[in-house]
Image: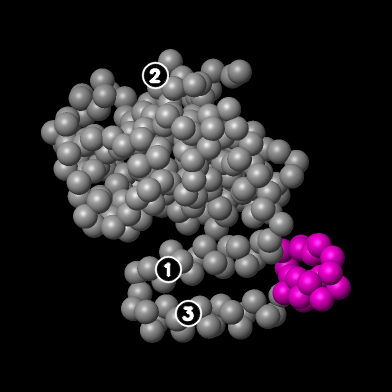
Amino acid sequence: MSDAPVLLAKEPDGIATITVNRPDKLNALNADVLRELKAAFERCRDDADIRVVILTGAGEKAFIAGADIAALSRLTPAEAGENARRGQKLTTLMEELGKPVIAAINGYALGGGCELALACTIRIAAEGARLGQPEVKLGIICGYGGTQRLPRLVGKGRAIELLITGEPIDAAEAFRIGLVNRVAKRESLMDEARTLARKILAAGPLAVAASLGLVHEGMDKLLKDALELEAWQFAKSFETQDMKEGTAAFLEKRPPRFTGK
């Protein structure tokens, strides 16, 4: 395996896998990793052949076990602010990629690692994985969006408990509160992620992208405005070749052959 801090593997079926590759450091985030992750996600965004992205960590112990604390401890307040903004730009890029991003959480997902998972579309955790936001135990707070995405995902009460105690939870509890979508056996984690990715690939790509955009944009709107946006997008979908192909395939009892047009 390459010693690059981030690996991007493109598969012929439209799936790309991004792997944080610092297993000896539990895949901890530093400036190099953030920069390489941003570049990898931008490549996935701009490559029309890639339709689903899987994010995971190298090794058996960690998805991403937070920040590199040694490097973090040396930051000035101004540098810390810039670090937070870099992380937020990355998580926003992931969230607004226009393509589903599946987090395959193979171990510790703590601090910035948990925040990256929160920015993914769907999260699958291996049995034994642990997730949390332990920043308060270092006397700091989340910087990559954790205080904002966590309550939107699991609710205010549960999010506040996780944020102000800093205590991690296991995969089963993460599933119970809605932090992860499903739990898989460790040995089948990537297979389950790819199976889910292929189910998404079987759907109309324009409809998938529109659904993602509507959820992200609509969450910050009044319901009446979000419903109007949905109706507009619904009507727009009827202009597409994918709509004609999808309905024809259903009526003809055959698999659709979507083209993304």
- Callout 2: SS: helix
Q: Is residue 107 visible?
A: yes
Does residue 147 sit above or below 61 in this rendering?
Answer: below
Name the residue rendered at 21%, 55% in the picture: 157
- Image quadrant where residue 17 sits: top right
> Which residue in the protein does label 3 denote?
229
Q: Which residue is mark 2?
A: 25
Mark 1 and mark 2 lie on one chain; the one further toward the N terminus is: 2
User: Which residue corresponds to the image point at 34% horizontal and 69% vertical from the top-left?
Assistant: 220
Q: Secondary structure at mark 3?
A: helix
The alpha-carbon separation of the residues under discs 1 and 2 comes to 36 Å
Where, quadrant-wise, is the C terminus in this rendering?
A: bottom right
Q: Are marks 3 and 1 in contact (CB under 8 Å)?
A: yes
- The residue where tag 1 is placed is 217
Residue 210 horizontal/vertical position (percent): 56, 68
How many residues crowd mark 1 within 10 Å: few (<14), some (14–19), many (20+)?
A: few
For residue 213, side relative to residue 8 (left or right): left
- Characterize the local packing of mark 3: few (<14), some (14-19) or many (20 or more) Cα atoms within 10 angstroms: some
Magenta stretch bounds = 241-261
